[in-house]
Structures are given as structure tokens and as C-alpha cells.
Amino acid sequence: MRTLLNKVTVAALALGALCVGLALPATASADEVNSVQLQVCNNNPRPMRFFVVGYNQFHDWTGSRFWDVQANSCATAWSYWWQTDRSVEFHFERSNIGWHTNFVYVPRQSDGGTWTYSAN
């Protein structure tokens, strides 16, 4: 039963990301509002998969593609820009044991940089 619930949850999260505008961005640039790319550091001995949902540089609510981060390492979510001074939804799973969601505040900072989020 738990496996079926995990499969349904993953499918629902993926469908939700598609419904909120999972579109490949045209270019990797922050044009209209202070925006940054996210670097995610996985401070855990298990690999992690994640995606992000939030407001991009064009004020659109959108979702990113999925990224994999190896154990105790970092990965940058290239070509996706997230508004600063706002929160994003950070969805992740480790070793296929279920999806979790954190609301992560991206602090105010200058445009075009990379901000690092450490996931424990």
C-alpha cells in the first residue's frame, strides 16, 4: 500500500509541476526583476532528486524540471531563475522514500547571481 501511495504522490507532483507551466525557459537570464538561480547542496549520505515551483523573473508562477544531487554534494538548477525576496516550493525525495516539500525563502540580493540552499 505504501508503494502505491508513493507512486500516486510522485505522479501527482509531476502532473502539478506540468500544470503550473513546466516549460523550458528561452534563455538563462534574469530580465525583469531581481532573480537568481538556485544551487542545492545535499548534506546527506543519500542521493536526492528535486524540483522547484515559484515565481520566475517574468512574474510567472512556474515549475522547473527535475534535478539529481549526489550524496554530500551540490547541483545548480541551471536556466531557471527565481525571484528574490520571495519563497519557492522546494520538492525533494531521497532514495525513493517519499516526496517532501519545504517552503524556502530566497533572500533579497542583486540580480543574476546564484543562491545556495542547503538541504539536510
Image: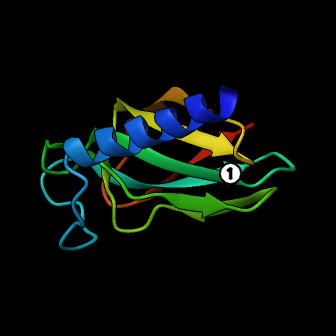
Q: Is residue 83 visible?
A: no
Is 93 located above or below residue 1 in the figure? below
Residue 44, x across and y down, in percent: 82, 45
Q: Residue at x 19, y 49 (%)?
A: 21
Task: Residue lying at the far front in this picture: please name it.
Answer: 1
Classify residue 14 by image quadrant.
top left
The colour mode here is rainbow
The residue where tag 1 is placed is 48
Label 1 residue SS: strand
Q: Can residue 67 be seen in this view?
A: yes
Asked if 100 appears above or below 79 in the picture, the reply is above
Disc 1 crowd, CA 10 A, few/some/many (<14, 14-19, 20+): many
Residue 48 drawn above or below residue 80: above
Q: Which amino acid does label 1 sit on?
A: Met
Can you give x and y, in whole percent of width and height, for residue 6 in the image? 59, 34
Question: In terms of depth relative to the viewer, which is nearer, 116 or 2?
Answer: 2
Front-most of 75 and 112? 75
Give the quadrant of the N terminus.
top right
Q: Give the side of residue 1 with respect to residue 73, left or right.
A: left
Give percent across and percent down for residue 28.
Answer: 28, 70
Q: What residue is shown at x 68% (from left), y 27% (from top)?
A: 2
Name the outermost residue toward the right: 45
Q: Residue at x 59, y 33 (%)?
A: 4
* Left or right placement of residue 115 versus residue 119 in this view: left
Left or right placement of residue 43 versus residue 101 in this view: right
